[in-house]
Amino acid sequence: MTQDGRALVVSPQAYALGVRRGMRAGGIRALAPETQLLERDHERERAVQDGLVLALLRFTPNIALAEDFGILMEVGRSLMLFGGAHRLAQQVRACARTLGIRVVIGAAPTAVGAWLLARRPRRGFEPVVRRCLRMERLKRLLDRLPCLLLPEAKPHTAWMDGVGAVHLGALRRLPRSGLKRRTSAALVDTLDLAYGERIELHRWLAIAETFDARLELFGRIEHADALLDGAAKLVLQMTGWLQGSHKAVCQFVLLMEHERGRTAIAPTPLEVALAEPAWQSEHLLRLLRERLAKLPLQAPAIGLRLITTHLEAMVPQTASLFPEAGGSSSDMLRLMELLTARLGHENVLLPQPLADHRPEVCNVWVSAAAKPRKIEAPPDDLARPFWLLAQPIRLLLRDMRPFYGGPLALIRGPERIEAGWWFDDTAARDYYVAQGQDAACFWIYQERGGAMEWYLHGLFA
Amino acid sequence: MISASVPHAAPGAVGIDPSQLPHVWRACELARAREPVAASGHAELDAQLPGGGWPRGALVELLLRQPGIGEMQLLKPILAQLSAQRRVALVQPPYVPQASAAASWGINASSLLWLRPKVTADALWCTEQLLKAGTCGAVVLWQQAIRLESLRRLHLAAQSTETWFWLIRPLSCATEPSPAVLRLGLKPAHGGIAVDVLKRRGPQCEAELIIPLGDMPDRRIDHDNHAPPIQPVPAVFAAGSTAPVLV
């Protein structure tokens, strides 16, 4: 990647061919003609930074932007919550890595100090201290940093070289008024801020009211499940935003944008409605994974967009001291949602028996996603088989006996069921309990009227 | 010589019965269950199960000669107990479960969950999810053919939860290896069900158990004496074609 005609970032392949940082474009072309030169795009870097800011809102709502794509986060009051500075840095790094961003993290009691530590150059393979929590240690560390790290010091490079002020410590030892006169007031102010001698005031970023993020994909993606990686980034941003703004999402839409061909193709929407407001990534991701796996794409997708359509205030769970066996009811709801996402709502069923004598009418199962109604009690407490055949099987008659694998003996019955004439769906049957030769019991019936056929309708299990 | 070298033990210590010692297991005994067990509700069966009941957090296989021989009634007592608080998931059962039958057995019908995955992979996936989530009290999975890797996976998933898990398969799978801690072969029997303990932690169980099941309709019929079992209902059969013989 180049900026102002000079190489800024070099890929390992190009490095192997001899390309180094700071080389001019002409020199690179001479060394390695097949090298791709990409101009730095500040606009897109800004978009990536915005995405990261959204995801980082999960750690603190106080986020400000610093120079050179720096992000300042005020976390002093929540260090305990995240298990200390080291753990927090790990979590921030993992969060950025999911978004495909490499970050250098500095931590210090002052924001400018943290920014300077993060930008501290690395010398060889020596470990560089970038985190400190006490002011005295920060002062010692800052004293050894080169002056040129401060952007305000750039115009005065020649003067500082002249007086031999290479490190910040040397600069601070100079008389204050003279320093202010010879350099600039801004440099002195920044130094004071870094050393904690002036109170820092930040303009924290305002958190947007609604969430609407876009992501450009690296290529044309033809399979919906390959979109999961991109969707994971957007979900991470969304959950960060949700936690920062203390909201929970009930419904969101993932739009898959298609390449504009001869005619514009409307983006494919994937609507996800949640039974319970959520703000955690894992559950949303598991749901999306199952939904994306089943979604057909008409055209390759080139971009993703995630929009929240229905939000609610976040109600944090009250954790109980002793975990309940079987988890909470929201765990069950989440599990149901996950199962429904994969199997389809018509295949995750709860019983909803109706008060009717006809077994096929009585035994109603409804989708778990449907609103639960009151369960009607069965009309009588009759012996019913546990298994019911979805479609009754017509039985043969041999020697005047119904036959199913062997002759069946009727051991109980008949139980006459005659119902449904008011819906023009008359069932007039005599039910018997029949036993086969191996002692297995069946629930069979004989149609009354018509051909008087015998049918197998259930099994006693 | 030896007795001379052994110092005299205290008089009470001589008569220790090894079977009374904890942590001593003899090969002729049933294993003591490490995981919690729940009584099956059938005394004859409990006597033959290690720990005296269905083990929790383990793969238990029920191998059926055919579906509909009283397998659900065998599980009825424990399902009734578990369904009072937690859900009971039925994954890919061979027929339509009848909620009113379950309710008449004392199972809380509203806690039943019927999953109808279309393919085996989905069935295994949702069983694993159910086991991992641990929110269900019991999971019953029906499968025809299942690979050994999948069985191991299910067994592992079951071990980490507080869920009772049964896998119901055809009896023909009895010869295949399985990581299940308990395997029972089930065959129909008059007024109950015949249980063959194929695998358990402990000595081989030789005898076939006949577990009486209260709600199983039964009447012993000698099929060879040609007694026509149909009790003709006058409206149905024309009189005179066959002489009705009641049994």
Image: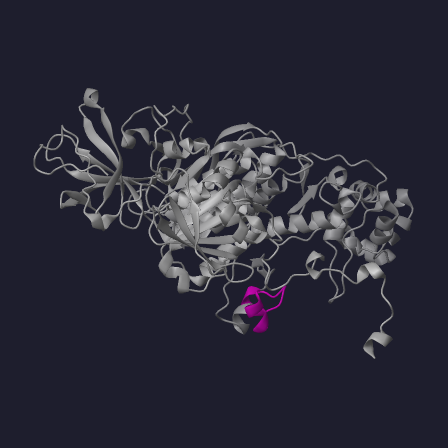
A26 part of magenta stretch: yes
Q: Is residue A93 visible?
A: yes
In the shown orientation, is residue A206 left or right of residue B200?
A: right
Residue A28 vertical position relative to residue A429 in the rendered view, above or below: below
Q: Is residue A124 above or below residue A106?
A: below
How many marks overall? 0
The colour style of the image is: one colour
Magenta stretch in the rendered image: A11-27
- Front residue of this view, candidates A80 and A323: A323
Q: Which quadrant is the C terminus of chain A positioned in?
A: top left
Quadrant containing the N terminus of chain A is: bottom right
Q: Residue at x 23, y 45 (%)?
A: A408
Image check: A129 left or right of A26?
A: right
Image location (x, y in percent) of residue B31: 60, 57
Q: Residue at x 10, y 38 (%)?
A: B242
Residue A386 part of the magenta-drawn span: no
Q: Is residue A164 left or right of residue A461?
A: right
In the rendering, at what x and y percent does residue A98 appear? 57, 51
Whether residue A368 is visible to the viewer of this picture, yes or no, is no
Q: Residue furthest bottom?
A: B1
Is B104 or B84 nearer to us in this picture? B104
* Quarter assignment of residue A402: top left
Up the image or down, A283 lies above or below A157; here it is: above
Question: Which residue is nearer to you in this view: A347 or A337?
Answer: A347
Residue A140: percent from left, percent from top = 87, 52
